[in-house]
């Protein structure tokens, strides 16, 4: 047989070789054909550089453009709005559909009571839409995934402590979505202020029982725990975003130019942007999606099935009613 000859050639005539490892190449080919989806939500009051950070992360204009809003009254919405923009990004033959969900108006009012509610409703609505697709008799071969995989929460660089709004938002939302807190515009703090602010935030998260990503209880093994412990010691990431390119020592890089020199966004001596990018894209992207599917969505699915006593028919009929009910509970 032609195939066995090839096998013998590539494995030095190893008689015991079966070829199970070829499954990895098959999976890679399939994944390359299908492409990937990633849904990121950014939350924080206006002026903290959310759009800029997203554009920096993906090195392209992936977040909404504010210059269209010329009228000052239009700039700050009266209520929390939710806007999603999707992009198809391709790198080295790998396609990814990236959706950035922005929440203009969050934390910008005089009274910010309950401003987390529309965000909580949006996240649950995506779980509900997925659930309704899943229980259909004629299911789609591939269910479109609009579930929020990760929420990046922007903390203002006050250098003091978390505001009640920050605590309330993260306490409620960490139960339904992976939250990664970041200190925005970290170049406004000195290194000492930054370290002490990070320490304070970690203590406050612990004191309020807020479990941000990567959650300790979902570490799979000792190696996982070791990697994740290092990340947990770094959270919240002190980040600086910039989509401006500068030449420094003959090299092109993203940064912010000041009178004192250039703050290099991807230089870990200047800020922790590189750690955030590695976590979200290079090392933990699949894990973030897995936890969304197997933990957060699963919790929602079980709750909804319990409500309908395991009758998918009732679940389908109640889909819309349940959404209204969930909202009225939150009000």
Image (tube, rainbow, N blue to C red):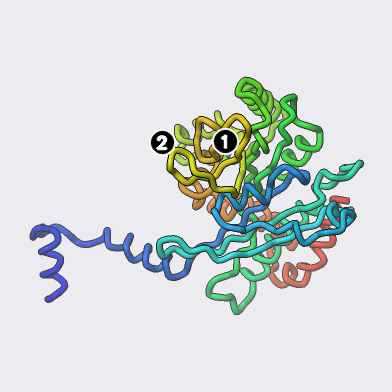
Q: Is residue 178 above or below residue 161?
A: below
Q: Position of residue 197 (x, y in %)?
A: 67, 25
Q: In this figure, which residue is indicated by the disc labeled 2?
A: 223
Q: Position of residue 123 (x, y in %)?
A: 71, 56
Q: Residues within 10 Å of mark 1 (few under 14, many from 20)?
A: many
Q: Is residue 321 above or below residue 159?
A: below
Q: Residue at x 43, y 42 (%)?
A: 250
Residue 216 appearing in the image? no
Q: Which mark is residue 135?
A: none
Q: Nearer the viewer, mark 1 or mark 2?
A: 1
State the residue in front, 175 or 88.
Answer: 88
Q: Residue at x 58, y 39 (%)?
A: 215
Q: Residue at x 51, y 40 (%)?
A: 266
Q: Position of residue 29 (x, y in %)?
A: 37, 67
Q: In this figure, which residue is indicated by the disc labeled 1?
A: 263
Give how far apart the Cα atoms at labels 1 and 2 are.
Answer: 34 Å
- Mark 1 vs mark 2: which is more N-terminal? 2
For residue 198, side relative to residue 173 (left or right) = left
Q: Residue at x 68, y 24 (%)?
A: 200
Label 1: state its secondary structure.
Answer: strand
Q: Is residue 30 above or below residue 171?
A: below
Query: Hey, which quadrant is residue 127 in on the image?
Result: bottom right
């Amino acid at each position: 047989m032609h195939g066995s000859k090839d096998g013998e050639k590539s494995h030095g005539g190893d008689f015991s070789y079966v070829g199970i490892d070829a499954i990895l190449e098959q999976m890679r080919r399939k994944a390359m054909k299908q492409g990937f989806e990633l849904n990121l939500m950014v939350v924080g009051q206006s002026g903290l550089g959310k759009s800029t950070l997203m554009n920096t992360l993906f090195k392209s204009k992936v977040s909404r453009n504010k210059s269209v809003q010329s009228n000052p009254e239009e700039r700050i919405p009266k209520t929390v709005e939710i806007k999603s923009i999707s992009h198809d990004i391709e790198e080295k033959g790998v396609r990814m559909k990236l959706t950035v969900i922005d929440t203009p108006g969050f934390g910008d009012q005089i009274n910010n009571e309950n401003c987390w509610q529309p965000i909580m409703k949006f996240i649950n609505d995506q779980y509900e839409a997925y659930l309704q697709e899943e229980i259909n008799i004629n299911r789609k071969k591939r269910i479109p995934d609009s579930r929020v995989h990760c929420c990046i929460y922007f903390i203002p660089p006050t250098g003091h402590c978390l505001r009640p709004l920050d605590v309330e938002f993260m306490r409620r939302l960490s139960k339904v979505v992976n939250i990664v807190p970041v200190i925005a515009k970290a170049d406004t703090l000195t290194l000492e202020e930054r370290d002490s602010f990070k320490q304070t935030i970690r203590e406050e998260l612990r004191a309020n029982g807020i479990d941000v990503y990567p959650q300790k209880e979902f570490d799979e093994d000792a190696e996982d725990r070791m990697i994740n412990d290092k990340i947990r010691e770094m959270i919240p990431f002190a980040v600086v975003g910039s989509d401006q390119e500068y030449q420094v020592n003959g090299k092109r890089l993203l940064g912010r130019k000041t009178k004192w020199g250039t703050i290099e966004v991807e230089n870990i001596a200047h800020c922790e942007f590189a750690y955030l990018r590695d976590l979200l894209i290079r090392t933990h992207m699949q894990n973030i999606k897995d936890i969304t599917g197997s933990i957060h969505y699963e919790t929602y699915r079980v709750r909804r099935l319990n409500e309908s006593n395991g009758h998918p028919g009732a679940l389908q009929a109640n889909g819309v009613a349940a959404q209204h009910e969930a909202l009225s509970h939150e009000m």
